[in-house]
Amino acid sequence: MIVAMQEGAEETQIQQVIDQLVKLGFEVHRSSGARMTVLGAVGTGIDFDIRNLELLPGVQEVHRISAPYKLAGRSFRPEGTIVRLPNGVNIGGNDVVVMAGPCSVESREQLFSTAEAVAKAGARVLRGGAFKPRSSPYSFQGHGEEALKLLREAGEKFNLPVISEVMEISQIPLMMPYVDILQVGARNMQNFNLLRELGKVRKPVLLKRGIAATLEELLLSAEYIMAGGNYDVILCERGIRTFETYTRNTMDISAIPIIHKLSHLPMTADPSHGTGRRDKVPPMARAAVAAGADALLIEVHCNPEKAFSDGAQSLFPDQFSKLMDELRMIAPAVGRKVG
Amino acid sequence: MIVAMQEGAEETQIQQVIDQLVKLGFEVHRSSGARMTVLGAVGTGIDFDIRNLELLPGVQEVHRISAPYKLAGRSFRPEGTIVRLPNGVNIGGNDVVVMAGPCSVESREQLFSTAEAVAKAGARVLRGGAFKPRSSPYSFQGHGEEALKLLREAGEKFNLPVISEVMEISQIPLMMPYVDILQVGARNMQNFNLLRELGKVRKPVLLKRGIAATLEELLLSAEYIMAGGNYDVILCERGIRTFETYTRNTMDISAIPIIHKLSHLPMTADPSHGTGRRDKVPPMARAAVAAGADALLIEVHCNPEKAFSDGAQSLFPDQFSKLMDELRMIAPAVGRKVG
Amino acid sequence: MIVAMQEGAEETQIQQVIDQLVKLGFEVHRSSGARMTVLGAVGTGIDFDIRNLELLPGVQEVHRISAPYKLAGRSFRPEGTIVRLPNGVNIGGNDVVVMAGPCSVESREQLFSTAEAVAKAGARVLRGGAFKPRSSPYSFQGHGEEALKLLREAGEKFNLPVISEVMEISQIPLMMPYVDILQVGARNMQNFNLLRELGKVRKPVLLKRGIAATLEELLLSAEYIMAGGNYDVILCERGIRTFETYTRNTMDISAIPIIHKLSHLPMTADPSHGTGRRDKVPPMARAAVAAGADALLIEVHCNPEKAFSDGAQSLFPDQFSKLMDELRMIAPAVGRKVG
Amino acid sequence: MIVAMQEGAEETQIQQVIDQLVKLGFEVHRSSGARMTVLGAVGTGIDFDIRNLELLPGVQEVHRISAPYKLAGRSFRPEGTIVRLPNGVNIGGNDVVVMAGPCSVESREQLFSTAEAVAKAGARVLRGGAFKPRSSPYSFQGHGEEALKLLREAGEKFNLPVISEVMEISQIPLMMPYVDILQVGARNMQNFNLLRELGKVRKPVLLKRGIAATLEELLLSAEYIMAGGNYDVILCERGIRTFETYTRNTMDISAIPIIHKLSHLPMTADPSHGTGRRDKVPPMARAAVAAGADALLIEVHCNPEKAFSDGAQSLFPDQFSKLMDELRMIAPAVGRKVG
């Protein structure tokens, strides 16, 4: 913590701030220059509301120094985390892993034909929604456990580990037998009760960035999960909300190299939700790999025009296959390969 | 739904769009001008992903015409909704209602001394948190049911109905005996499972706008609750996330008159979370009343410097009392009075 | 400047940063705690790119302490600046000054009938555009000097000082004989060449906040003008760009109390551009006065439906008159009166 | 133009809107369904403020159909524009062109050693600033014409066409003899007087997107230049302002494929300003090429730590050379090559 006093702050004001910091358990270092005094406070408490200092008389500015997360920070594991899945699929290693499949599991036929197509094109993980968080109460809400069973079956048939979204605590035990990665959607990034429960689970969690979440907040949410003992957290950029309305969201590609600097956790990207439009998915998928993404999450549907949800952002199988070829050309530029 | 075809769109393309619309149950009207063709589609389906049309060949733009919500729209109750609470407190009527109290219930003494102060100054509802959603896993998380009991007791002693935040479905039955209004926090505005459960409850719900939620999304979340049969929904502006970082959030005062135009539901404001800084709470509380807010939600603490959470945005009791006097002067300019 | 070194930074890295700071003319204070080292650098240079330090090896974070502006800061004139106009109109004093008139000067009749109406309702300054910056090359671009002459004439007839927008350096000498306040539009807030020229002028300048400008950037632009010797700068909030699209811009009412804390310059608001819709102008004008605005800039047109520009955000004269009555009721709540 | 009337709008209200549209020169088509009436208005006027209709009684929503730009739209030149520079460099063709050089021209030695390095690494255009728009009045403001002369000389020596930024109208004639592309910075994207003058020039103009500009606004600014007869406009993404503060700006990579769909103009990217940090430039440069950028603008400095401006975002020459190798690997994935 650094506290900069206003020019002309009185000695009693400075002393009051020092007393407050000492009371809070900080060790205080004082630097007084010709014009102003700066206090450096070093301590162990990670949780402190700096606004309480900002409002003391004579204080100009307060800056938190240490990041508010520990386990998620790069220095906790400088060599980087590799999340190991069944069938030898590793996220965070040398391979760029592509996770693909339909937005929602709609039927056995839809799922299996899509899974077959993506497996053939080179996807290494199968995605599919069983519970759908929809912004309208009048929309399709997912097939639930039935969908999970189909996912498991399709995953085994095509040799693909399975990822699906968990929306609330009560769904965790239901999902455990079926999925290999539990996905937390952007709207739940700060559902702290859910995150805490996922900390107790021993399966990898893919945590999506909220549409208005800073990268620091994303790491703090990862910390919630890790604080419970589950270190297999995979992060995911899926678009943030900005003033530009042409696309649903603005996909923040720079989040990929930034997270790689701040954290040891694998960083992935979801260009389907990141753009919301099928024709923008391939360029943004390519961009994500070129920027260093460890994995991609891509919606593919055997018949997007008939999809129950998000058909507009789902690729046709042949588009996906062409995209995989392009990604295979790009990955070597960042010293990787596409599985 | 309006579909504008590109200049030079071919007749077969136009026909394909018309066929698609008819298949979806719309009645289609076609207008062809010198340069372009526009299709008007009128139908009853409220849930439709317009991107599916945008991607058809020859289509330039698609606009949804009718709002995606019904029950929350102004035309559903043109005269406006008044939410009636115990003790004759009405939100949405002629009185501007001030709801005040501490961020978290910390102790009997803290709660009762704060409640006494706010009641004396003119607050009509008592607020206080029992479950605290905190962005750090290492922060104070609330006293739970014990806090709810104290709230109820304090509310009865000072003749104030009680509002407190519900964070997940399992807390609803626990809270029902103690609170008069269930508050949904900004982070849960799109927790659709929670909203659906709150639709089954027969207590008013105060729904806060998410920090990145459009006003249309806020109304759609209200629709979720109302679709379950609970029409006593109160909306609340509490700041949105923008590029300006001086305050935690940018409080969107214009949301107040906009919601009053679009919806019949009462619209309130929370200047404490809206600004995050004690010294900015009074000006923004005054601004909200001047813009027509039906109620305010204000954090007051008998000893903000020792607060377990959000002390920096809590008013001292005497600041609150002075603010109430100012609000009493402003309300008549909008034909209201402060209770 | 505060430089926080990473945990485990090596002594040679720390020394390199210290050397760099000393070379740049800073006096350095070092605080080493159990886990980390913090360097406080005090100096006189106001212009320094902190990213150069952030990129040095071993550095975790760098914070600038002193504000990058001096003349515009509150401490330069703690008692506040009052800008004095002809006819005894003062901006920044006890009166809330309302500046009103048409978006563009269209004709003698339009200007004079509008000016008469706003003067009668209590406006103290006449606004009107002579040069119109329009986002489409095919739009009305203003009547130029002819408009300025009419403004001057109307101002004298109705005893109102005159404000009009300057768009480029070459217009300054042209405008000097006609206007009492030179207005800089939001798009020119960082037109630094223009600001520098306005620093040489001896007329008040009203500087509007850019739609994506932070308040710090607004003050830095004011500093440009003041550095040239012109201290009569009036600041103006007119809406920022956010993700919400219902209104053209999101008017940041909290900018008013924030600027009053950070700066001594008068802070005003333009609810016409801030909302872009006539029906939202009165609530936001009331909110601005309730939050402490020193003046308002409001578009009024004797016949808004026929306006050449921005008719949709112009008030009818009788709406304006009613609004003035409301503002007169609100101002006493902040210890002011409406002239 | 599409006007959707409210449910229950009266016949007289509908008639009033139709009359208004006809008066404005539109041909009106009316569609009345069971619940509502929709009016389609087809006309030639490109400049119309739709808010004037939105405010008429009985109107629910108004949508503009045709894009407000013509010359910049894809349909004006479906095959795409190629901007031809001296020495056979083409922007918008098969080659991805890299434009590189220092932020500001500081000295002959600095410029020539940087120019030599970038030419050797494969850059095809030399960039360098002569007039620097700086947000602080106390910063280095550029060497002006002297810098332009050096640029020209270096460009000729290393066989590189030259690009430099023009900040105001008076600089245009000064720059004409020296530069091959006139660059318009983000802050001047809506300096309409400057754009109009550039429409009269017969040199290519590179127009940067403003930090809060939508892509539609960018195209509208291009339209200003093209309306004057100068069709050689190159567009450039350089980061937009969002709530995320880790980087200076959020570089919107999706702008590249979007502009390619909406417009025929070449679309380029500036990862140096887009990120503001040297370590983020290579990943974002790679991402831009993978997303289909026609050219890149990259700051390189022979000694970035001593740069007068923006050293923190300038690459070292060897970093640039390594980046060029990576780009050469990526370009074939999008059917291009790096010159």
Image (cartoon, coloured by chain):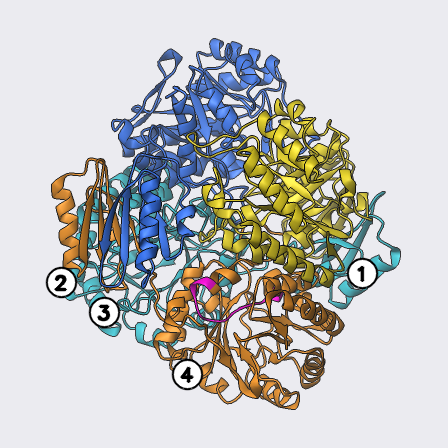
Chain colours: A cyan, B orange, C yellow, D blue
Amino acid type, residue under disc 3 in the picture: Ala
Q: Mark 2 sits on what residue?
A: A109
Q: Which mark is residue A147?
A: 3
Q: Mark 4 sits on what residue?
A: B201
Callouts 4 and 2 on one subunit = no
Give how far across and how far down residue D231 sits, in percent.
37, 21
Q: CA distance from mark 3 to mark 4?
A: 30 Å
Residue under the image location 41 percent in, 75 percent down: B194
User: Which chain does the residue under circle 1 lie in?
Assistant: A
Q: CA distance from mark 2 to mark 1?
A: 68 Å
Measured along the vertical axis of the image, is residue C14 above or below residue A84? above
Q: Which SS class for mark 1?
A: helix
Q: Mark 1 sits on what residue?
A: A18
Q: CA distance from mark 4 to mark 2?
A: 39 Å
Give the magenta-colored segment's residue range: B261-272
Q: Which mark is residue D78?
A: none
Q: Do the residues bearing badges 4 and 2 touch, measured as CB atoms within 8 Å?
A: no
Give how far across and how far down residue D97 sits, in percent.
38, 24
Q: Earlier in the sequence, mark 3 or mark 2?
A: 2
Crowdedness of circle 4 by 10 Å Cα count: few (<14), some, many (20+)?
some
Q: CA distance from mark 3 to mark 1?
A: 59 Å
